[in-house]
Image (cartoon, rainbow, N blue to C red):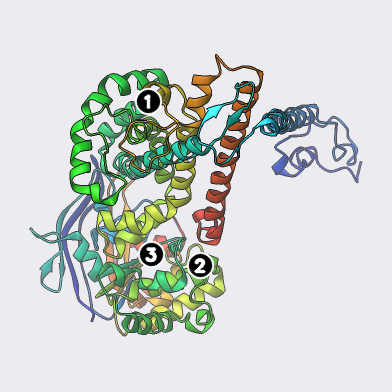
């Protein structure tokens, strides 16, 4: 189910502007890797290069390699649509499809993949919503609109939608930044369960969150405004937060800047 | 002195920000004077203006409806035949005035329906092309071009329809007659006759309403939140699947509203229809056959030579058109309201 990500020499551009420069890292399967760093350091951009979502912005492009196990996502002939079915994504703001019910939202990815059998879909809806810890709250109103749920429930619905297609990797772009602390806690617990099945990469501005949920933490930084973001340090989370090897990391996590 | 708040505090604490009105810089030293409201002249003037405009609209609507009702009442009471089912239009017959709207209602609805069937899918396609497919460099001039089409006067469309479209449609009509003639609708009883038919009018109306439907749909498609499009893409949707999953459902109420605007124009189009259609009081399901009529076209053709009762009879026809337009719009509102909780509005 889960795959290793191996990034080497990756740079990403918006038009003529270089957003991230020469990033290389390895993400182990069935682990949670957190990306931290000041705003504008390119952590979200980098995350979006991992499922080829970066290039949906007009003028955006990527250089370098991203290996999923041994397959380069940016190799010749690789279909970005197929990549995104393998590498799922959860966004900063909960974005269930407003025109769909809870049920339809969960099966949206499967429908795109051509699954039509009602029995299969029913099973996936239950298992995905259970996987996202949402089943008990919504099982009696699966045909109600997904947009009628609370923010935290909507985000768990989006997680259910993402895991319904059984991806190899789950990318989360600040999934809790629009949620209250209780919903945040629910999502964090969920991340702990999901890492048994998926490789998870999470961008967060909340350093306690990074410390709580992740096994490894990557610190990104930029030299100045207009400069591309770079990976400063990637290490075990415990080490990053207790004894980082780079001074800038220590300054950032101790609140001296950023 | 001890109880007075610091001056910078009294500056900040104004009325709730939602009114958008800042209190005048407080000169009073005591804490109370800064909290007392002044009469806000701008607010009351603007309220009066906007409320007045709203009321004026209602008054005009009521005046039109009342006028139409009154005059049509006079006409219908003098009609010797059934107003709703009679084909012919002879209100100025002194001995026995007889007139009915059957042909007009049929012609209006059929030509507008043909126009909608052709225009809505094409307009949706053009709108999607502009909003989601074309590179920005091409999309913008293309959008202007479509807007420009909306500015062409009806009479130009009418002339073009009569002088170009009618002579060039015979090929299409004989093709339809040959292969779809069995449907009865596309059967021609008089092959080779000039194409001054409801079908031709429908095509012309489709071209005329295309720009307005395109322009409104395009704006709605542009409003689709980026987050929903990315949600679909991240699930592994192709561009078309993304449009089907996120853009079209979100834009559905907008497409319906846009179609209603177009339909309003198609139902009421006068001069272009009058230029193209060969008027007759024949009601035929063979939409390729020349002849028929529409409300607006009939009014334009008959108004000049109409006598007193003739004018009132035309008012009555206008009244029916008014009612049909209201009914169609009401139906569209219902369709939109039925799925309100699924609209993008609560996202």
Q: Is residue B264 above or below residue A197?
A: above
Chain of the residue under the numbered disc 3 shown in the image: A
Q: Residue drawn at (15%, 61%), measured in percent from left and top? A: A79
Residue position for label 1? B278
Q: Secondary structure at mark 1?
A: loop
Q: In 3D space, how far apart are the residues under numbered discs 1 and 3 (Cα atoms)?
A: 86 Å
Residue B171 image label? none
Q: Secondary structure at mark 2?
A: loop
Instruction: Single out the residue that lies furthest toward the front.
Output: B95
Categorize mark 3 by other alpha carbons within 10 Å: few (<14), some (14-19), many (20+): some
Instruction: Single out the residue that lies furthest toward the left.
Output: A76
Number of the front mark, 2 or 3: 2
Residue position for label 3? A250
Callout 1 touching callout 2 (CB < 8 Å): no
Q: Residue drawn at (54%, 69%), measured in percent from left and top? A: A149
Residue position for label 2? A145
Q: In 3D space, how far apart are the residues under numbered discs 1 and 2 (Cα atoms)?
A: 52 Å
Callout 2 touching callout 3 (CB < 8 Å): no
Callout 1 touching callout 3 (CB < 8 Å): no
Q: Residue drawn at (21%, 66%), measured in percent from left and top? A: A25
Q: Decide which of tag 2 and tag 3 comes sooner along the chain.
A: 2
* Residue B153 showing in the rendered view: no
Chain of the residue under the numbered disc 2 shown in the image: A
* Residue A136 showing in the rendered view: yes
Does mark 3 fall on the same chain as mark 2?
yes
Query: Observer-nearest residue: A127 or B323?
Result: B323
């Amino acid at each position: 189910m889960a795959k290793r990500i191996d990034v080497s020499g990756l740079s990403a551009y918006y038009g003529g502007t270089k957003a991230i420069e020469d990033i290389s890292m390895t993400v182990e399967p069935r682990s949670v890797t957190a990306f931290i760093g000041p705003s504008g350091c390119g952590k979200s951009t980098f995350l979006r290069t991992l499922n080829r979502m970066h290039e949906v912005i007009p003028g955006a492009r990527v250089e370098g390699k991203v290996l999923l196990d041994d397959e380069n996502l940016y190799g010749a002939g690789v279909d970005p649509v197929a990549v995104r079915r393998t590498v799922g994504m959860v966004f900063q703001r909960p974005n269930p499809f407003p025109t769909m019910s809870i049920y339809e939202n969960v099966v949206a990815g499967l429908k795109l993949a051509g699954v039509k059998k009602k029995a299969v879909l029913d099973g996936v809806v239950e298992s995905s919503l259970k996987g996202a810890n949402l089943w008990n709250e919504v099982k009696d109103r699966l045909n109600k609109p997904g947009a009628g749920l609370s923010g935290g429930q909507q985000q768990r619905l989006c997680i259910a939608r993402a895991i319904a297609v059984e991806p190899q990797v789950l990318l989360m772009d600040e999934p809790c930044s629009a949620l209250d602390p209780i919903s945040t806690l629910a999502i964090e617990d969920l991340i702990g369960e999901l890492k048994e099945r998926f490789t998870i990469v999470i961008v967060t501005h909340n350093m306690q969150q990074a410390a709580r949920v992740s096994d490894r933490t990557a610190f990104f930084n930029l030299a100045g405004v207009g400069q591309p973001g770079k990976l400063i340090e990637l290490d075990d989370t415990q080490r990053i937060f207790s004894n980082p090897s780079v001074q800038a990391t220590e300054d950032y996590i101790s609140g001296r800047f950023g | 002195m001890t109880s007075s708040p610091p001056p910078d505090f009294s500056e900040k604490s104004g009325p709730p920000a939602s009114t958008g009105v800042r209190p005048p810089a407080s000169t009073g030293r005591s804490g109370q004077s800064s909290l007392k409201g002044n009469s806000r002249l701008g607010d009351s003037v603007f309220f009066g203006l906007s409320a007045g405009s709203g009321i004026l609209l209602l008054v005009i609507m009521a005046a039109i409806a009342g006028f139409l009702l009154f005059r049509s009442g006079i006409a219908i009471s003098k009609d010797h035949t059934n107003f709703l089912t009679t084909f012919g239009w002879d209100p100025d017959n002194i001995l026995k005035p007889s007139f009915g709207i059957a042909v007009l209602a049929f012609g209006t609805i059929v030509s507008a329906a043909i126009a909608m069937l052709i225009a809505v899918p094409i307009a949706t396609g053009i709108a999607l092309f502009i909003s989601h497919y074309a590179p920005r460099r091409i999309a913008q001039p293309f959008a202007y071009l479509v807007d420009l089409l909306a500015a062409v006067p009806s009479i130009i469309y009418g002339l073009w329809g009569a002088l170009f479209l009618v002579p060039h449609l015979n090929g299409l009509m004989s093709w339809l007659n040959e292969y779809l003639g069995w449907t009865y609708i596309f059967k021609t009883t008089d092959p080779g006759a000039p194409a001054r038919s409801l079908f031709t009018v429908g095509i012309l109306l489709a071209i005329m309403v295309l720009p307005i439907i395109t322009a409104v749909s395009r704006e709605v498609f542009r409003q689709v939140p980026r987050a929903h499009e990315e949600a679909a893409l991240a699930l592994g949707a192709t561009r078309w699947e993304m449009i089907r999953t996120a853009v079209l459902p979100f834009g559905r109420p907008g497409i319906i509203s846009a179609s209603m605007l177009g339909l309003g124009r198609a139902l009421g189009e006068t001069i272009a229809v009058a230029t193209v259609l060969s008027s007759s009081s024949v009601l035929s399901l063979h939409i390729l056959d020349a002849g028929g009529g529409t409300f607006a076209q009939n009014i334009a053709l008959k108004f000049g030579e109409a006598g007193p009762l003739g004018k009132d009879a035309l008012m009555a026809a206008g009244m029916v058109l008014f009612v049909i337009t209201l009914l169609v719009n009401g139906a569209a509102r219902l369709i939109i309201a039925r799925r309100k909780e699924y609209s993008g509005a609560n996202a």
